[in-house]
């Protein structure tokens, strides 16, 4: 029975009986977290899977996940082949060529959902603060994506979010028991004790349930009889109660026979407690499994066919404290002979105190295996220990560098910084250019992630000198991008020029990198010219370079090419399960969709990309997408949502010297003000931008026509003359119909009446994106109405309003409607009325559009990283909004693009 936990039990019951119940139970050691999980297990309406984190297992990739899923891995065959391969490969049960820890998380999600189709499922994860980081990532990734499935996941972890960060998940904090509940528990555990002794124990235990259970067992016989003496374990009121319990466990371990202590030590140093492994290990130590019996009678462990389980994690700690270093080294050696290759390497490393290339080699082999399985945190730890044991200084530097790179990939910036710092201190004898280049690359990544993009560029320039041709091009691609992403700085242009100088001329890959470097330099110099299009084959190029080439299409206004390229990048990432790359590709896709006038699709892409970027720990791309979301809210007239997104984006930009997030947020304010008719605000805002730290952002070229329109509307057209000249230079340089159409519109706004009509008609004759064409129709319709040509005006204004409605551009639609009324024709309907897609959420819209293509729920889920059941839930919610009852009816309502 649990005393004093009625409120907490109700929270657990709620998690168990609602769809997708996730709860993180936190508290100090001994506070009853495991008891709450036991309560949940007893109340579970279906199947229960459980695992307990073990501190010694924290460097073994996916160790905890394997133990959790071991009973159900036969169901992995029901997963999409790519996910099944990733999961089984990560768990060491199948070969895998390239691991992706986030794809493993997706496979974990879908396996749990597959199981829940039979009966409700409960996953219990105890001591989550000791999970290996790969298992923690996979389980949290899955937990955050549970939506409507009968799956509950309960984590128990010690206090402090740093020990097991669970951003965004509901938490339940267990406090100490009140006096009444503590008294009931103590009476149940020690009813034979005199009342005075119980009162003293209540004071000592301080409401900690484990202390209330264990402290009575520590009493001497005279104390149990009520002798009026200080209790033996009383170390003063400042001593943490868990330390007193730990001391009691240590004393009980020390009182055991040497053979039993050897058994306990082997179990404490082994991760899994498997009897076969322990039998071999303790046999080497002169003991046998039968020697565990004494520890069982002392209440320290439980032994069953499933293995050895410690009564409490503090018992494991007490065993290690009670045994000296000689005993621990002997136990490690015995275990090294009894376990598999991965654990063998760690046990050998634990007893190797001097450089030993053989052990270092085993650790490096472990790191390579872990990398194939997607365990970057383990890769880093293994390389770091291998570096410590390297006899050759050059090998040590190479391994420290590899450790730093893996830590950076895993998002462990502090560990990466420490490792690369050690590599730098010992890099003197290194002559290997690839190692020196990698040192620069890792240092640059850490500087960029910390918000120092120009420092990152300088570090990349250093690495270029030592790198081979292929690595040099990769470093220079990053250098151009890092330089551009920085807020304005006096050194920025010089660094961009240096990047271009370092880039070799030539065709193919070198030509593409040179074009990108030149393009970034021209942007920073405010050169309105354009860089020639790269016409080579993109498929064989590294992902980063293809991403940059696609992104650079915005400079040349190749909107359709940018959309096609970004779509291909996203599809590739989905097909290959490269979730770590997907936020970058989705950022470019969202911008391409936005610029090409697909606002709803852009909102759906932003929503998915933001969630994924947050989950995989990519703050740059998360902030970037938040800025794009602010623009989309601005064009929709959602002022409160825009303000929220813009504030978040600006915080991203201000916390680090990153340009894009804040720039898009500011551009969103411009488009919001313009749509609401706040023209002076538009002019003032863009004037400030021209002098500010984000003035070199290329996207402002797309805002120049907004400045021109605002100047014309406030009656100061001359204010826009310079901006018009610059926009004309760029638009004519691109030769693309979209910018040229907008240029004609801008000139029409400033032109005398006898020229304006021809310019408007020329603008409409060119194919342009939907939003810009609707804006042209709006201003042309206004011009026609002012010239008493109302019938013609109504044609343009009706078309504009319809387009704005399709784009969810509410303030623009309202303006068109107002003009229609002024032209003598009441709008036929309210904005957005009759448009079924307008009622869908971004997630529902994505699901519906894929359903239209004939994709199954499983196929849709694989693309959107959702479970099939969640896909079905979104369709269930979308059908009534669309007025349909089956997939077959969707095609007549939903465009495929």
Image (tube, grey):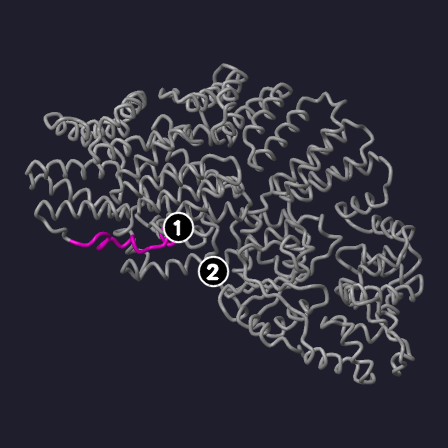
Residue 213 can be seen, yes or no: yes
Indicate the secondary structure of the residue bearing disc 2.
Answer: loop
Residue at x 82% of width, y 80% of height: 197
Residue 535 can be seen, yes or no: no
Residue 191 belongs to magenta span: no
Considering only vertical position in the picture, is 175 above or below 60?
below
Q: Quadrant of the C terminus?
A: top left
| Residue annotated with mark 1 | 855
Q: Which segment is the magenta one?
A: 829-845
| Residue annotated with mark 2 | 147
Q: CA distance from mark 1 to mark 2?
A: 20 Å
Indicate the secondary structure of the residue bearing disc 1.
Answer: loop
Considering only vertical position in the picture, is 735 above or below 448?
above
Rendering coords of residue 277 (x, y %)? 81, 56
Please tell me whether mark 1 or mark 2 is closer to you in this view: 2
What's the mark number on residue 193? none
Disc 1 vs disc 2: Cβ atoms closer than 8 Å?
no
């Amino acid at each position: 029975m649990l005393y004093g936990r009625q409120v907490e039990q109700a929270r657990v019951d709620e998690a168990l009986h609602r769809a997708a119940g996730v709860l993180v139970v936190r508290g100090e050691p001994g506070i009853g977290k495991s008891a709450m999980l036991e309560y949940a297990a007893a109340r579970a309406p279906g199947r229960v899977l459980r695992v307990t984190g073990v501190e010694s297992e924290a460097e073994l990739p996916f160790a905890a996940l394997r133990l959790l899923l071991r009973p159900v891995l036969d169901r992995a065959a029901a997963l999409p082949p790519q996910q099944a391969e990733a999961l089984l490969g990560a768990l060491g049960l199948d070969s895998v060529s390239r691991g992706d820890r986030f794809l493993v998380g997706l496979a974990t999600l879908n396996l749990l959902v597959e199981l829940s189709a039979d009966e409700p499922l409960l996953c219990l994860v105890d001591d989550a603060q000791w999970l290996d980081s790969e298992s923690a990532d996979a389980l949290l990734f899955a937990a955050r994506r549970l939506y409507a499935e009968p799956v509950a996941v309960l984590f128990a972890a010690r206090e402090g979010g740093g020990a097991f960060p669970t951003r965004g998940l509901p938490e339940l904090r267990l406090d100490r028991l009140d006096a009444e509940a503590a008294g009931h528990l103590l009476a149940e555990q020690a009813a034979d004790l005199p009342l005075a002794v119980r009162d003293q124990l209540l004071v000592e235990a301080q409401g900690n349930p484990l202390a209330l259970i264990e402290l009575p067992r520590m009493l001497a016989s005279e104390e149990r009889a009520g002798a009026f003496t200080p209790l033996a374990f009383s170390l003063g009121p400042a001593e943490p109660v868990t330390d007193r319990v730990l001391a009691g466990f240590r004393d009980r371990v020390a009182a055991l026979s040497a053979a039993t202590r050897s058994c306990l030590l082997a179990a404490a140093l082994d991760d899994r407690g498997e009897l076969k492994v322990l039998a071999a290990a303790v046999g080497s130590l002169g003991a046998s499994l039968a020697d565990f019996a004494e520890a069982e009678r002392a209440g320290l462990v439980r032994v069953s066919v499933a293995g050895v389980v410690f009564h409490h994690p503090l018992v494991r700690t007490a065993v290690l404290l009670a045994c000296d270093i000689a005993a621990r080294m002997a136990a490690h050696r015995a275990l090294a002979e009894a376990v598999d290759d991965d654990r063998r390497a760690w046990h050998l490393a634990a007893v190797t105190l001097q450089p030993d290339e053989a052990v270092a080699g085993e650790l490096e082999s472990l790191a390579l295996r872990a990398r194939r399985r997607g365990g970057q945190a383990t890769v880093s730890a293994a390389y770091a220990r291998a570096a410590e044991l390297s006899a050759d200084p050059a090998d040590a530097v190479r391994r420290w560098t590899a450790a730093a790179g893996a830590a950076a990939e895993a998002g462990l910036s502090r560990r990466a910084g420490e490792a690369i710092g050690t590599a730098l201190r010992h890099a003197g004898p290194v002559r290997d250019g690839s190692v020196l280049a990698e040192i620069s690359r890792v240092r640059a990544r850490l500087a960029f992630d910390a918000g120092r993009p120009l420092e990152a560029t300088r570090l990349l320039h250093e690495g270029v000198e030592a790198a081979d041709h292929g690595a040099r091009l990769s470093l220079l691609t990053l250098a151009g991008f890092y330089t551009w992403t920085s807020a304005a700085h006096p050194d920025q242009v010089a660094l961009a020029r240096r990047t271009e100088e370092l880039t070799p001329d030539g065709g193919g890959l070198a030509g593409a990198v040179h074009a990108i470097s030149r393009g970034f330099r021209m942007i920073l110099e405010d050169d309105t010219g354009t860089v020639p299009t790269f016409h080579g084959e993109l498929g064989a190029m590294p992902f980063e370079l293809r991403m940059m080439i696609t992104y650079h299409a915005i400079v040349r206004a190749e909107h359709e090419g940018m959309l096609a390229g970004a779509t291909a990048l996203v599809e590739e990432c989905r097909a290959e399960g490269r979730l770590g790359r997907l936020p970058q590709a989705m950022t470019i896709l969202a911008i391409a969709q936005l610029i090409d006038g697909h606002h709803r699709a852009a909102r759906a892409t932003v929503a998915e990309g933001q969630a994924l970027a947050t989950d995989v720990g990519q703050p740059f791309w998360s902030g970037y997408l938040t800025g794009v979301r602010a623009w989309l809210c601005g064009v929709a007239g959602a002022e409160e949502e825009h303000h929220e997104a813009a504030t978040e984006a600006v915080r991203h930009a201000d916390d680090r010297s990153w340009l894009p997030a804040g720039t898009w947020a500011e551009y969103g304010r411009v488009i919001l003000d313009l749509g609401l008719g706040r023209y002076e605000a538009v002019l003032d805002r863009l004037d400030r931008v021209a002098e500010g730290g984000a003035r070199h952002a290329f996207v402002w070229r797309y805002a120049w026509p907004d400045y021109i329109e605002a100047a014309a509307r406030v009656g100061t057209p001359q204010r826009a003359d310079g901006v018009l000249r610059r926009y004309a230079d760029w638009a004519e340089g691109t030769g693309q119909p979209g910018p040229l159409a907008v240029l004609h519109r801008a000139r029409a706004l400033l032109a005398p009446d006898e020229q304006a009509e021809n310019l408007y008609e020329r603008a409409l004759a060119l194919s342009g994106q939907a939003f810009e064409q609707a804006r042209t129709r709006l201003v042309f319709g206004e011009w026609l109405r002012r010239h008493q040509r109302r019938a013609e005006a109504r044609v343009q204004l009706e078309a504009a309003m319809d387009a704005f409605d399709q784009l969810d551009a509410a303030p623009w639609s309202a303006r068109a409607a107002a003009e229609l009324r002024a032209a003598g024709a009441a709008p036929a309907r309210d904005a957005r009325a009759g448009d079924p897609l307008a009622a869908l959420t971004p997630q529902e819209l994505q699901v519906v559009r894929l359903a239209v293509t004939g994709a199954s729920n499983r196929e849709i889920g694989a693309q959107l990283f959702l479970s099939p059941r969640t896909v079905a839930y979104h369709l269930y919610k979308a059908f009534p909004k669309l007025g349909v009852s089956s997939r077959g009816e969707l095609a007549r309502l939903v465009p495929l693009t």
